[in-house]
Image (cartoon, rainbow, N blue to C red):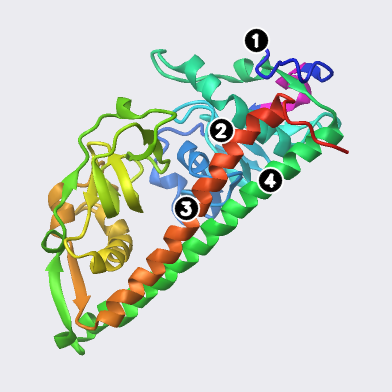
Amino acid sequence: MIFNETEYNTSWSTKKLIELGDFSRGKSRHRPRNDKKLFNNGKYPLIQTGDIKSSNLYVKKHSSEYNDFGLKQSKMWDEGTLCITIAANIAESGILAYPMCFPDSIVGFTANKNECSELFMYYVFEYIKNSVKSSASGSIQDNINIDYLSNLEFKIPSLKYQGKIVEILKNIDEKINNNEDIIEEINNMAITTYNFKILQKVKNNANIDNLKIFKISDLVDVVTGKEDANFASPNGKYPFFTCSNEILKCDEFKFNGKAVLLTGNGELNIKYYSGKFNAYQRTYVLIPKEEKYVGLIYHALLNKLNTLKKGSNGSIVKFITKDDVSDTKIYVPSNNNEIESFNKYLNTIDQLQKENRYLYEIKNYILPLLMNGQIKIED
């Protein structure tokens, strides 16, 4: 099967992916893989399949760090290496923004510069991702291997033409990433404000008469979605929030309003959405009884997320219970201007997220058309 063969790219060469560069599997020989001996005083970045899945184009964050002992049983990969996941989160890809280690559930690809670039191959894997996932689905343990990747066939244009495809798609991705960086900066500013103006007052017992203490359940009805994973529809009209960082689509909405969404298990994250949507049965939907509190609730929970992720013994929990959410304390200023400042942060974030969703739609629309030659790029 040639993934992108059409009447529009008959002049392009047909090649197996192994002809374009070298595939090599990650290393993590020591067992158990979470042995503290591998990580104590660590300094060498280590990523997992989830870090690649949550990235866009570049992998810019790592989940943990190996020490010297950990590095000996693994390998440090160069900046610019293309990573492809072959187990757990199948067929996700990303390019290392700095040197990192990764386990054998990830394959590294280094391009033959006479044939292609890692950037072009990233978009190749974005194009074939869903097909690869489908081919792996249903096995005893969903996975693929280097032989499978190596023998995949693809119609490849000239290096010059590849560069034009990459330029178009990379410009979109860099705008998305820039927006994500701004969102992160705004969130950090809001959390700093919450810590300094509110939590620091509580800690120092200063001006606490101007603060009211509530439980989250005093300000919202803590409910979950009712749908299972099969509710998702690729061409659906409404956002469908699950326990993944990725936002899916569905055909029917259940909720309508300004909502904070907290995942109960899986990737454990917090999102904000305004409008009509639906949610998975392990996703908490928090729509404030008074809309003015939505920004404060979002940033208070974001500030509390790491605590919610950990159980009483400090280890990462597998799921967040309804009581964990309902009983979370939130300190509310009596000054409405202070409350509104958190909504201003959130409104800016919302606009950037809407722009990114639009950019993703554009990218997902033109990616296959560029890769199968249907969109022609002039010299």
C-alpha separation, residue under disc 4 versus residue under disc 3: 19 Å
* Residue 44 seen in render: yes
Q: Give the mark count.
A: 4
Name the residue beneath numbered marker 1.
1
* Residue 271 seen in render: no
Task: Residue 356 in the image: state x and y as whole percent.
Answer: 52, 50
Name the residue beneath numbered marker 4.
170
The foreground one among 239 and 118 is: 239
> Residue lying farthest right?
379
Task: Residue 317 in the image: state x and y as whole percent.
Answer: 26, 46
* Quadrant for the C terminus in the image: top right
Name the residue beneath numbered marker 3.
354
Helix, strand or loop at label 1? It is loop
Residue plotted at (64% across, 48% down): 172
Task: Residue 41 in the image: state x and y as whole percent.
Answer: 47, 57
Label 1: few (<14), some (14–19) or many (≥20) C-alpha neighbours in 10 Å: few
Task: Residue 339 in the image: state x and y as whole percent.
Answer: 28, 76
Q: Which residues are magenta?
A: 15-23
Left or right: where does residue 203 sit relative to residue 342? Answer: left
Residue type at the position of mark 3: Lys
Label 3: few (<14), some (14–19) or many (≥20) C-alpha neighbours in 10 Å: few
Instruction: Tell me where residue 231 sits by quadrant.
Output: top left
Helix, strand or loop at label 3? It is helix
Mark 2 vs 4: CB contact within 8 A: no
Which mark sits nearer the N-terminus, 2 or 4? 2
Residue plotted at (16% across, 61% down): 289
Mark 1 vs 4: CB contact within 8 A: no
Name the residue beneath numbered marker 2.
27
Which mark sits nearer the N-terminus, 3 or 1? 1
Helix, strand or loop at label 4? It is helix
The foreground one among 277 and 67 is: 277
